[in-house]
Amino acid sequence: MKRFITLLMTLGAAVLAQAAQAPAITSIAKGDMSGVQTARQVTVRTLAEWQKLWKEHAPEEKMPAVDFTTRMVVGIFLGSKPSAGYEVEILNVRPEGKDLVVEYAQKQPGRGAMAAQILVEPFHLVAVAKHAGPVRFLHVPDTR
């Protein structure tokens, strides 16, 4: 019985350690209207970088607070698109070796679909646990 309890405690500790390593995603802002007109992927590690990006993205809106001592911001901007129906969403963030991999999916209007003919700038910004190494963005199929 003592071995069984020890085994359970060891497994429980391993599960908790793995959960602590998986960076939690906190969505900061998502939508289809941004001042960022060109497609890009961003990694923001300091308050100064965040202020600069937010001023370009949404200068009239209040900048969300981020604790850059423990967190950083990653995001995707699709740039200017010709109609409604375009979306981007960061689905997952995971460590892979020394890298942090940001998995994201995109949607666009289907062929022949009715969509409002307005310019949109889809984006998604999330806060994740601070990571000192490289950040890679990986487009994955949309399964939503």
Image (cartoon, rainbow, N blue to C red):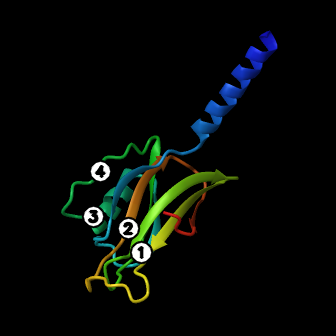
Can you tell which of label 1 and label 4 is closer to the viewer? 1
Considering every residue shown, the one lying at the far bottom of the view is 112
14 and 35: which is toward the camera: 14
Residue 11 rendering spot, x and y as whole percentages: 71, 27
Q: Earlier in the sequence, mark 4 or mark 3?
A: 3
Badge 2 amino acid? Phe
Q: For the residues labelled 3 and 2, say whether their Cβ atoms are less than 8 Å apart.
A: no
Tell me, for residue 64, which label it has, or none. Answer: 4
Asked if 132 appears above or below 15 in the picture, the reply is: below
* Element carrying mark 2: strand
Give the residue at x 55% y 61%.
Answer: 103
Q: Which residue is mark 1?
A: 78
Give the residue at x 38% y 58%.
Answer: 49
Badge 4 amino acid? Pro
Mark-to-mark CA distance, 3 and 2: 15 Å
Mark-to-mark CA distance, 4 and 2: 15 Å
Q: Which residue is mark 2?
A: 123
Can you tell which of label 4 and label 2 is closer to the viewer? 2
Give the residue at x 36% y 51%.
Answer: 47
Tell me, for residue 55, which label it has, or none. Answer: 3
* Element carrying mark 4: loop
Quarter of the image where one finds residue 35: bottom left
